[in-house]
Image (cartoon, helix red, strand yellow):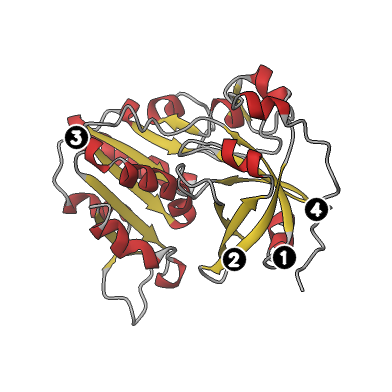
Amino acid sequence: MHDMRFTIPGQDLNREPFAVKIPDFQKKSEVMITDKGYKCRITNIVPLSDLERLFQLRIIDPLEREVFNFRPGQFLMLEIPGYGESPISISSSTSNHEFIELCIRKAGHVTSALFEARQGAFVSVRGPFGTAFPMAEMQGHNVLLIAGGLGIAPMRAPLFWINDHRDKYRDVFLLYGAKEPSQMLFTYQFEEWKKVSHVQMSTIVEKPDESWTGRSGMITALLDEFTFDPKDTYAIVCGPPVMFKFVCSHLDRLGIPMNRMFVSLERRMHCGMGKCCRCMVGSTFTCLDGPVFDYWSVMNLKEAI
């Protein structure tokens, strides 16, 4: 029997605006009138580690499922009825309208409640919100993807995008680091990224165990393994904010311009629409002006990282 504890009460969703056009979530005026939830069913749960799981959600209404759209780097507000909402980066392909994938770490009140749900339970999502990685701007150039820990989750969306448009990009590099081998996520996709997406990939861990045969150390050590033209390369960096300064400073020394480095900041976001002001850094709303920023902008945002 399905777990129905997280069933959302019936909502009077105004489907008319969704049928006419997809809202522009970059415009506050349109965000304010689309504060509605997409009712979803959990169709699959994939354990990734002791603390992380991949949840596959399917929007129940066929029309809403078809018009739902997002760009790599954007996020959703995931609602667990009775527990609240949490901002979650989208980890799936933009071309997949059958389900949405969210990689979630059990860390707080909302995510702990979600980990009690089983396949068939109902949840709700709002969005997508925020800025995205400039995938079109990167076309015709090398792309360097650097992920630390859970940062591989938002990195999957640009990886899917590149795979769907592989002929439009030059060399693609993926550097992935974790604290321990057991904390590495999506290991079952590594060979696919290498062979199908033609991504040059390298991994590293800070604390190797007896089973680990790869590199050990900090993720910046992997940057010396590849040869690329820094003036013709874009970089995407996802992971804990503490790694941004070290990685981006290293990329700067290699010659990659700061306005061609992009990071994803998820900073105390709560509403996703700039209403609650919890994610403000100075006069900047992380949920509206971000979460994707070029590193030059981040350097000019006091206390951003």
Q: Residues within 10 Å of mark 2 (few under 14, many from 20)?
A: some
Alpha carbon distance from label 1 to label 4:
12 Å
Labels 3 and 2: the sequence-earlier one:
2
Q: Is residue 284 visible?
A: yes
Badge 3 or badge 1: first in the primary sequence: 1
At label 3, which amino acid type do we have?
Pro
Q: For marks 3 and 2, give the CA distance.
A: 40 Å
Residue at 68% x, 49% y is 60
Label 1 crowding class (10 Å Cα cut-off): few <14, some 14-19, many 20+? some
Question: How many dots with numbers?
Answer: 4
Q: Which mark is residue 45?
A: 2
The reply to whether dot 3 and dot 4 touch (C-beta < 8 Å) is: no
Q: Is mark 1 in CB contact (under 8 Å) with mark 2? A: yes
Give the amino acid type for the residue marked by disc 2 in the picture: Ile
Depth check, mark 1 against mark 4: the one in front is 1
* Residue picked out by circle 1: 117
Q: Is residue 268 in view from this perspective?
A: no
Q: Quadrant of residue 231?
A: top left
- Label 3, residues with CA under 10 Å away: few <14, some 14-19, many ≥20: some
